[in-house]
Image (spheres, helix red, strand yellow):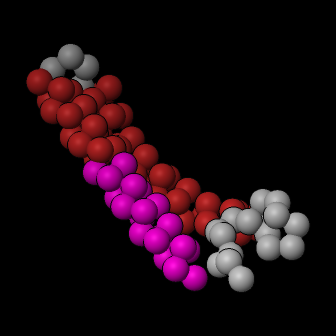
Amino acid sequence: MSPSRPFIEPGSGGLDTDQILVETYPLAGLVLLFAGLALVPFLLALLFGGSFLSGLFTVFAQLLLAIGSGIMLMYVIARGVQLSGE
């Protein structure tokens, strides 16, 4: 018997929407976490207008978004490896 594939219902061969929703919540939490963290420096950059400090806050917010994207990508890869091993 072939191993079961993630997100596929074994009986019907269709998508397992319950498993898809369960796997979506942690990823959505990570997206909201890093978007919220990056929102603060972006708002501070808007507050300070065209000054050097505004540019510094913008760079810091973009750094937070890049780090968040990397962490989310690592989570997706690690979770995919876990699901394929089950």
Residue farthest to the front, as pictured: 1
Viewer-proximal residue among 70 and 4: 4
Instruction: Report the predominant secondary structure element of the magenta stretch.
Output: helix
Residue drawn at (11%, 24%) of the image: 52
Residue 23 lies, with reference to residue 67, above or below; the image says below
Examine the rendering and report whether any part of residue 37 can be seen: no
Residue farthest to the right, as pictured: 12
Viewer-proximal residue among 57 and 1: 1
On the picture, is 11 further left or further right than 21?
A: right
On the picture, is 46 further left or further right than 76?
A: left
Q: Position of residue 47 (x, y in %)?
A: 30, 27
* Magenta stretch contains residue 10: no
Residue drawn at (41%, 56%) of the image: 72
On the picture, is 83 further left or further right than 66?
A: right
Residue 11 lies, with reference to residue 20, above or below; the image says below
| Residue 8, image quadrant | bottom right
Looking at the rendered image, the quarter that the C terminus falls into is bottom right
Looking at the rendered image, the quarter that the N terminus falls into is bottom right
Q: Position of residue 22 (x, y in %)?
A: 67, 69
* Magenta stretch contains residue 84: yes
Viewer-proximal residue among 7 and 11: 11
Residue drawn at (46%, 71%) of the image: 81
Examine the rendering and report whether any part of residue 55 can be seen: yes
Residue farthest to the left, as pictured: 52
Residue 49 lies, with reference to residue 33, above or below; the image says above
Question: What residue range appears in magenta?
Answer: 67-86
Residue drawn at (24%, 43%) of the image: 63
Viewer-proximal residue among 21 and 52: 21
Residue farthest to the top, as pictured: 50
Q: Position of residue 68 (x, y in %)?
A: 35, 52
